[in-house]
């Protein structure tokens, strides 16, 4: 196998850990509903929301947490969200309809992203707040509201390309939002159409892990709010989007060792760690390491609500150096956030059945074929490297790693995990995955923490293979209960989901 196994064990909090310790249930579910199968855990979403709320509370900030719907299509998650006091950020007509149907009232919904006329109409018709990307979009909305005699619409202005010195662009360019230097004509339009639109605030969403980039953007928004006020407008909120991140791995040391090992493998000083020597963005040019690692930082000690807290503690250099939170509080601005991935942390897992296990003549990694397609477990799509957990078929027997099956079942093995499409490239992950024991056909490989983007964002119906089913699971005392995702309502669990 070439050296020590390099594990990347998933971080498991109590709910997912308990589910994974319920092998009879997991095997019953996949026998009934097929593989792959997604399991979502709606109650975890409510707990994650509380963590964001407590950051607001500690800093005395008001405002709303809007769950970014696009991260998961689940009805159960959305209906559980409706039973809290949070909001939802919708980015399509379908998502808006879904949110309204789940019980989220328009005052708890914001519409972002590219908008077709139907989406804009339903948003304006129901008095949802609309986040506008451009002056063109504002004009479209104004025309629509006037033509159909719709109510005056609350709008946010989405901004981008924030600058600190007036020269250096400190946040990345984006297809979305209006560059801050083009703000003037936009504000003139907002003033002109004051009878039709009500400017409630400004917004940004940056798809980056960089705290300083986000702090620059938030600071930029605070300056824009001041400018609005000096013009007589009365905006009162700033929406800082999502991108708070998730910590996927249990052990930072494993991540260090793995990424070091990958670098060495690319340079050829240790055996390959990937199928076909794939380098995840790194390459070897005549003995020199080139490129950049295109991976999600899977071990992130500061993620989710903690990341928000650090952002709020960041000093605003151009505004006297106070922490951003203090400036928000001084002006009594509402702080809106739109976490997607972070609110779905530990909210679900994906079960895949092992169909075939084959040794290679060459002695390389075991070839393991799963009843799933790569896009059913789209970890690779997001550059998230994380091991699955083996749930043995012999469910009454042994926990992972302590199996006593005959042969080599207790030895660690390196594997390539293939999907079920007739494609050479249908690898669930291009990485050699080390498992603590040799899997057998009928075992399940459970991919933990897949609720954010990995379940259905990339799912297709290629080759007439059905899209994976989804169930919602919750605990009643020590017992796990479940139903199909679209059967779940907050009244479903006995005792209710409060
Ligand atoms: C995708 C998206 C989000 C959520 O991003 P995460 O990284 O999942 O937190 C929030 N706001 C907007 C506008 C988005 O497009």
Image (cartoon, grey):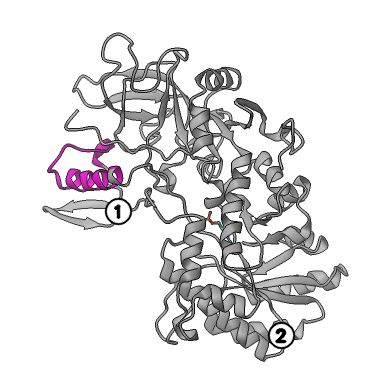
Percent x, y for residue 230? 66, 91
Please state if 429 lies on the left or on the right of 162 as rendered. Answer: left
Specify the segment rendered in magenta: 254-277
The residue located at (67%, 34%) in the rendering is 485
The residue located at (61%, 86%) in the rendering is 226
Name which quarter of the figure residue 292 lies in: bottom left
Q: How many marks can you see?
A: 2
Sequence-wise first label, 1 or 2:
2
Furthest residue toward top: 406
Q: CA distance from mark 1 to mark 2?
A: 45 Å
Residue 270 magenta: yes
In this rendered view, identify the residue nearer to me: 471 or 293: 471
Furthest residue toward right: 149
| Mark 2 lies on residue | 233
The residue located at (48%, 86%) in the rendering is 320
Residue 111 magenta: no
Q: Which mark is residue 33?
A: none
Please state if 162 lies on the left or on the right of 258 as rendered. Answer: right
| Mark 1 lies on residue | 293
Q: In the image, is the residue at mark 1 within 8 Å of ligand 1 by its beta carbon?
A: no
Please state if 178 lies on the left or on the right of 424 as rendered. Answer: right
Q: Quadrant of the N terminus?
A: top left
């Amino acid at each position: 196998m070439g050296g020590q196994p390099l594990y990347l064990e998933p971080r498991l909090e109590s709910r997912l850990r308990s589910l994974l310790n319920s092998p009879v249930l997991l095997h019953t579910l996949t026998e009934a509903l097929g593989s792959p199968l997604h399991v979502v855990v709606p109650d975890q979403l409510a707990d994650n929301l509380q963590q964001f709320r407590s950051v607001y509370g500690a800093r005395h900030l008001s405002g709303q947490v809007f769950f970014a719907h696009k991260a998961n299509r689940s009805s159960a998650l959305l209906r559980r969200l409706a039973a809290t006091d949070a909001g939802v950020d919708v980015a399509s007509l379908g998502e808006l309809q879904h949110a309204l149907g789940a019980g989220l009232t328009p005052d708890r919904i914001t519409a972002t992203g590219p908008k077709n006329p139907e989406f804009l109409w339903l948003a304006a018709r129901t008095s949802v707040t609309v986040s506008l990307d451009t002056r063109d979009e504002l004009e479209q909305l104004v025309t629509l509201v006037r033509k159909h005699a719709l109510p005056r619409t609350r709008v946010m202005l989405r901004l981008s390309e924030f600058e600190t010195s007036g020269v250096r662009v400190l946040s990345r360019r984006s297809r979305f939002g209006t560059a801050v230097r083009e703000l003037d004509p936009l504000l003139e339009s907002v003033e002109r159409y004051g009878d039709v639109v009500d400017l409630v605030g400004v917004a940004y969403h940056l798809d980056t892990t960089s705290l300083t980039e986000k702090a620059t953007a938030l600071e930029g928004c605070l300056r824009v709010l001041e400018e609005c006020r000096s013009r007589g407008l009365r905006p009162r909120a700033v929406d800082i989007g999502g991108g708070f991140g998730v910590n996927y791995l249990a052990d930072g040391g494993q991540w260090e060792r793995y990424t070091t090992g990958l670098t060495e493998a690319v340079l050829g000083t240790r055996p390959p760690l990937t199928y076909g020597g794939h380098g995840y963005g790194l390459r070897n040019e005549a003995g020199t390491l080139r490129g950049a690692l295109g991976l999600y930082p899977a071990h992130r000690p500061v993620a989710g609500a903690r990341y928000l807290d650090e952002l709020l503690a960041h000093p605003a250099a151009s505004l006297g150096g106070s922490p951003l939170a203090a400036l928000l509080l001084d002006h009594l601005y509402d702080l809106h956030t739109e976490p997607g991935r972070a609110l779905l942390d530990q909210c679900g897992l994906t079960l895949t059945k092992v169909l075939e296990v084959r040794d290679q003549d060459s002695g390389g990694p075991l070839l393991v074929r799963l009843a799933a397609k790569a896009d059913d477990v789209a970890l690779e799509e997001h550059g998230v490297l994380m091991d699955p957990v083996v749930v043995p078929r012999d469910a009454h027997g042994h926990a992972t790693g302590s199996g006593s099956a005959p042969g080599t079942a207790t030895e660690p093995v390196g594997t390539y995990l293939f999907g079920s499409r007739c494609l050479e490239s249908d690898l669930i992950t291009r990485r050699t995955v080390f498992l603590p024991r040799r899997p057998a056909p009928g075992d399940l490989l459970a991919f933990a923490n897949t609720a954010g983007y990995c379940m259905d964002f990339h799912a297709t119906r290629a080759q007439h293979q059905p899209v994976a089913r989804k169930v919602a699971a919750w605990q009643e005392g020590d017992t796990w209960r479940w139903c199909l995702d679209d059967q779940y309502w907050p009244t479903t669990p006995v005792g209710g989901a409060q």
